[in-house]
Image (cartoon, rainbow, N blue to C red):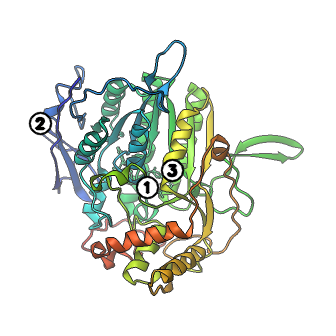
Amino acid sequence: MAHILSTSCSFKTSTSATPYSKTSNQYSLAHPTGLTFRTSIYSLKKLVSHGKRPLRHLTVCATTLSMSQESQTEPTSGTQDSQNESSKPKRVMVIGGDGYCGWATALHLSNKNYEVAIVDSLVRRLFDHQLGLDSLTPISSIHNRLRCWESLTGKNIQLYIGDICDFEFLSETFKSFEPDSVVHFGEQRSAPYSMIDRSRAVFTQKNNVIGTLNVLFAIKEFNDDCHLVKLGTMGEYGTPNIDIEEGYITITHNGRTDTLPYPKQASSFYHLSKVHDSNNIAFTCKAWGIRATDLNQGVVYGVRTDETEMHEELCNRFDYDGVFGTALNRFCVQAAIGHPLTVYGKGGQTRGYLDIRDTVQCVELAIANPAQHGEFRVFNQFTEQFSVNELASLVTKAGEKLGLDVQTISVPNPRVEAEEHYYNAKHTKLIELGLKPHLLSDSLLDSLLNFSMKFKDRVDKKLIMPDVSWRKIGVKPRTVTT
Ligand SMILES: NC(=O)c1ccc[n+]([C@@H]2O[C@H](COP(=O)([O-])OP(=O)(O)OC[C@H]3O[C@@H](n4cnc5c(N)ncnc54)[C@H](O)[C@@H]3O)[C@@H](O)[C@H]2O)c1
């Protein structure tokens, strides 16, 4: 069946105080600082039936190219093999599939013969426009990415563009795609972004908490057998002075023993949104029998996966700036352009890290081995721990081998966090399911550095230093010009 639809997307600056503005055939979504994202719905009308109620701020689009692909010839990962059900591919909805982890995961699952749909509001691209940021790597539009993927592999990934905080939109995507699993990456994921100003803090918590609540309600309403795989973060736990367990801890108190959720000590409005999500998911598992896996992910590094390497149009984003850049990626870019590595404070901050190739593997393992009904399963998704100082020293050594002169400076820590602390987090459950980690070897660091050097002309040095302070956050909206 061929669906040939298209979206037309434009960015518009709005001074309107109304949260949602609407013209005769266009619907706009409100985002911080008055920018609106506008998408035409002309092309949707054929595909998605919206029932009798008028659309409000709904943005829906399913874009797929013609697809004549028939059933797979070989049994593969995405295929259900049961006596009653003959080789029907499992259907996975990847929310946030245009983002860093989501794009790599959507391609990986499609390559493994899952039937994949991406749901994304493209708000991450809007953040870049608002803040004057850009990925180190040139990234294609989601439409070109998907066309390229289909022309290379013959595999079709459906696309639904819209905001999951809009329940009508999300309902239509659920009814249209009928997922067996939902992988939920679709959140505002930067701690510094959530600490820029009041409006970004509020946006982050609204976007993340309401989006996840809507996903839970959609699963309950449309298919309570659907397995939710939700991306949480190791940052939910904070840095306690005891070992971090995977989700739960057994405590004996005044002679009585119980296994309880591991205490959470989040340290930004972003991390707190993840804690709120985890609580909401745990509650709905108990109350409604939802089956869910919370993947408390560490910091992800790297850019290449088997699938994104197939063509430059499939290239993933790579953030190096002070707002979205994660530690190791940022250090590699700094080393490549001769900028000192910026260690925040004493540099003893220790976290779990993983290669993006392991992110996609972990998600696949979680889907293939779903949680039971009513089970709120928690996996700590990382492969190695490093302090910031250890990372800086690894990048320095790898840079020297490539002839780079790598310096490190300590900059005042913009965050409120322990700079020297105990850290020992468990991470065995995904290994038990079969994860084969890609550890941070010399060769990987070489390739990350070479990759950063390849695109070094695209680096804007002004974006590197941190300028979001946890202590100075105020109510006044910060725009790119202030
Ligand atoms: N990147 C990391 O190092 C890392 C570490 C730990 C956890 N995580 C988690 O993994 C997930 C993905 O992270 P990422 O680095 O790929 O982020 P990203 O910002 O690159 O991707 C998120 C995607 O979700 C979309 N999105 C956001 N809000 C949405 C909404 N309301 N409706 C529809 N789409 C929406 C964005 O447009 C974007 O494409 C996040 O939940 C993040 O918290 C990431």
Where's residue 164, x and y in %?
35, 39
Q: Quadrant of residue 303?
A: bottom left
Q: Is mark 1 within 8 Å of ligand 1?
A: yes
For discs 3 and 2, the disc positioned in front in the rendered view: 3
- Going by the numbered disc 3, the residue's amino acid type is Thr
Is 69 rendered above or below residue 405?
above
Is 424 rendered above or below residue 45?
below
| Mark with earlier residue (1, 3) | 1
Where's residue 383, x and y in %?
61, 56
- Which quadrant holds the C terminus? bottom left
Provide the secondary structure element on which disc 1 rests: loop
| Mark with earlier residue (3, 2) | 2
Question: Residue placed at 90% from the left, 44% from the top?
Answer: 255
Question: Residue placed at 30% from the left, 33% from the top?
Answer: 169
For discs 1 and 3, the disc positioned in front in the rendered view: 3
- Going by the numbered disc 2, the residue's amino acid type is Asn
CB under 8 Å between callouts 1 and 3?
Answer: no
CB under 8 Å between callouts 3 and 2?
Answer: no
In-image side of 96 versus 37 (left or right): right
Where's residue 331, x and y in %?
46, 74
**Residue 359: which numbered mark, if any?**
3
**Location of mark 1 (residue):** 189
Whether residue 344 is visible: no
Q: CA distance from mark 1 to mark 2?
A: 31 Å
Provide the secondary structure element on which disc 3 rests: helix
**Location of mark 2 (residue):** 25
In-image side of 303 versus 412 (left or right): left
Q: CA distance from mark 1 to mark 3?
A: 15 Å
